[in-house]
Amino acid sequence: MGINMQDYWYSPAYVIYMAQELIGIYSQEIIDKDSHNFKQVGEMKCTAIMLLALHKAFGHHFFMQASKEEFPDVWTLYQEQVRTDYVDTKYQTVEVVTYFPNMEIEVADFVLKSKLINPKKAYDEETIIVCYIRKAGTYVDFNQLYQKLSKHKFKPTRVFVIGNTVRDQNIFMLSQVWPIIHHEAVHFIERAKSYPLPHRVFFKKGVTKTIDYSKNRGTLKTNPYEVFNIDEGKVREKYEKT
């Protein structure tokens, strides 16, 4: 397991733009059904919305990268000024589990069985678990969910649930459900529009200086396939997109 430092890191806003571009080319239905080719689109979009909400709450300037390995789904990073001459770069692994419309299991049981107490999933303390609610009208009793989680032992120290609000499909509610309950609503389109530049950077691991944003403000060549690790030629041929 390792971060690919030869690839770009993207802002969550840029990931949102690129996900929307792919939806415009192939349709949401195809992207949802073809998990072999488009699995990381949903995972990255979910993580991007989570990061936009965390940016709103804490002000951190996040970047993200799709993993090319089985674990994690997504890498993220942000920086904290520890002292005047030292910046700490925080790397985070994110695992996304999607609650689809055909599911009848309760959300709490779904998260526990699929990620937190699954013997095949040995996540560490730094892994963020995010449950992406795709089933419209799903009711989540957050107090009950918290109580269920508290009855089990697991290593991940941050667990979130995210999904659309009923009134506005552009507003998502990010709910931290472990180790505390906290809610943050975010209009992801408006938040993406106002997200600070740059939208793409190279970053060297181990460097203790602040990212030089001024050197990363060049014009971006739109390439959603690169962002989501998609074989462009393969999917264009499959869906006859020339």
Image: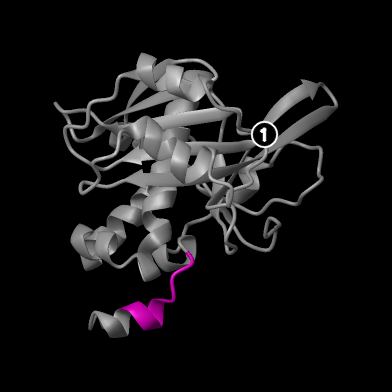
Asked whether residue 232 is drawn in magenta, I would say yes
Disc 1 residue type (three-letter): Glu
Residue under the image location 16 percent in, 32 percent down: 137
Residue 38 percent across, percent down from the top left:
36, 64
Residue 82 percent across, percent down from the top left:
78, 22
Residue under the image location 50 percent in, 43 percent down: 115
**Relative height, residue 22 to residue 74 (above, below):** below
- The answer to which of 219 and 89 lies nearer the viewer is 89
Residue under the image location 22 percent in, 58 percent down: 28
Residue under the image location 54 percent in, 50 percent down: 74
**Relative height, residue 39 to residue 238 (above, below):** above
Quadrant (top left, top right, bottom left, bottom right) of the N terminus: bottom right
Query: How many residues crowd mark 1 within 10 Å: few (<14), some (14–19), many (20+)?
Result: few
- The answer to which of 152 and 92 lies nearer the viewer is 152
Residue 57 percent across, percent down from the top left:
47, 19
Find the magenta span and give its range: 229-235
Quarter-of-image position of residue 52? top left
Asked whether residue 127 is drawn in magenta, I would say no
Q: Secondary structure at mark 1?
A: loop
Colouring style: one colour
Is any part of residue 198 visible from this angle? Answer: no
Residue 70 percent across, percent down from the top left:
57, 61
Task: Report the side of 220 relative to 33 (left or right).
Answer: right
**Relative height, residue 8 to residue 126 (above, below):** below
Taking the view exactly as shown, the residue that stands out farthest to the left is 167
Taking the view exactly as shown, the residue that stands out farthest to the right is 85
Quadrant (top left, top right, bottom left, bottom right) of the C terminus: bottom left
Task: Report the side of 98 relative to 77 (left or right).
Answer: left
Q: Which residue is mark 1?
A: 125
Is any part of residue 60 visible from this angle? Answer: yes
